[in-house]
Amino acid sequence: MQKSSKKSYLIFLLPLLLGLSSCNVSPYRIQVPTEAFGLLRHNMMIGVCNEKGCIPKMTASTSSGAFFAQSRENPDYSFYLTAGHSCAKPTFPKFKDGSYIEHMASILEVVNENLEKMPATIVKMDRRNDLCVLKVLTAGASNITYLDVSASPAKRGERVYNMAAPYGYFGKHTVLLYEGFYSGRPSMTEAVFTIPTRPGSSGSVILNSSMEIVGVVYAGVEKLETMSISSPHESIHEITTSVINDDRSVAQICLIGYCFTAYMR
């Protein structure tokens, strides 16, 4: 009887093992909307200066971000969410020999996963929570999709997802994808996630399982690569909602040598 029992057990186990090793078992897979991702290039002209003058040079930095809405006023444009410091005018330290670097001009552009370059302008910034919204000329660009902001923040222990371009690593139909967990909120301006973060990840959105935005990375910890610090959910909801509600055409008007920006419905 004991021998028969072992044989029956093996007969039951064999199909199970074969089934696990066969192609019929679907691998774990999440469909992340990478068409909403954009690499932000902040192209800058700087001057390397001393008492004799400045030598102009071109340089650039890269960040991450995502599209969250198309302009209702002008469908040729779309709104793009990223970190505030990715848009801001940079500051440079002075050197011991008295020389310094001066920021002269900036041009912002967003590159989608088809490597199409699109000019961008700053619409709104939230410096306290390190957020920025750009208006991007997406007319003619292919396969742009838009992400919704979640109605509620992530819950502690919730699995989340991230698409980013650390160190500017990004290519045609190639967006780096990460996953982690929401860990908590140690302060009013910080939400912590266990997502790998390196320079260039700033501005990358954090998504819940419904692929809705629950965070925007603005910082990491140098010696703890699997931790990211995000702007709080309510600040993300506030800035994106206000931009959508205040969607207007912009015109530069000059009269008798004086110029001002006019917003038109």
Image: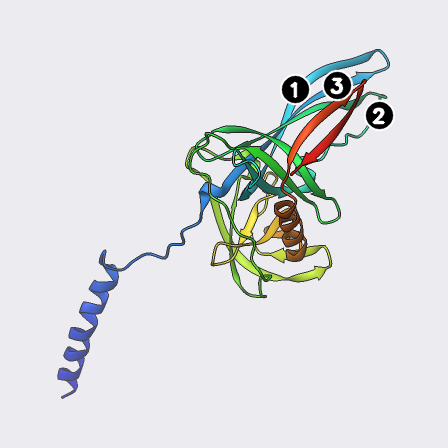
- Between the C-alphas of marks 3 and 2, the distance is 17 Å
Write down the residue under mark 1: 58
User: Callout 1, which amino acid?
Assistant: Met
Tell me the crowding category of disc 1: few under 14, some 14 to 19, or many 20 or more residues within 10 angstroms, Cα based: few
Label whose residue precedes the other's in the sequence (3 or 2): 3
- Between the C-alphas of marks 3 and 1, the distance is 9 Å
Residue at the image position 57 percent from the left and 38 percent from the top: 73
Disc nearest the viewer among 2 and 1: 1
Is the C-beta separation of discs 3 and 1 under 8 Å?
no
Residue 199 x/y as whole percent = 61, 39
Label whose residue precedes the other's in the sequence (2 or 1): 1
Secondary structure beneath disc 3? Answer: strand
Of the pair 138 and 101, the residue shown nearer to us: 138
In the image, residue 205 above or below residue 90? below
- Residue found at the very far top of the displayed protein: 52
**Does 220 sit left or right of 71 as displayed?**
right
Quadrant where the image shows the C terminus: top right
Residue at the image position 68 percent from the left and 17 percent from the top: 57
Of the pair 147 and 175, the residue shown nearer to us: 147
Labelled disc at residue 47:
3
User: Callout 2, which amino acid?
Assistant: Lys
In the image, residue 22 above or below residue 169? below
Label whose residue precedes the other's in the sequence (3 or 1): 3
Secondary structure beneath disc 1? Answer: strand
Write down the residue under mark 2: 96
- Between the C-alphas of marks 2 and 1, the distance is 23 Å
Disc nearest the viewer among 3 and 2: 3
* Residue 74: quarter of image: top right
Residue 132 x/y as whole percent = 66, 42
Residue at the image position 13 percent from the left and 83 percent from the top: 4
User: Callout 3, which amino acid?
Assistant: Gly
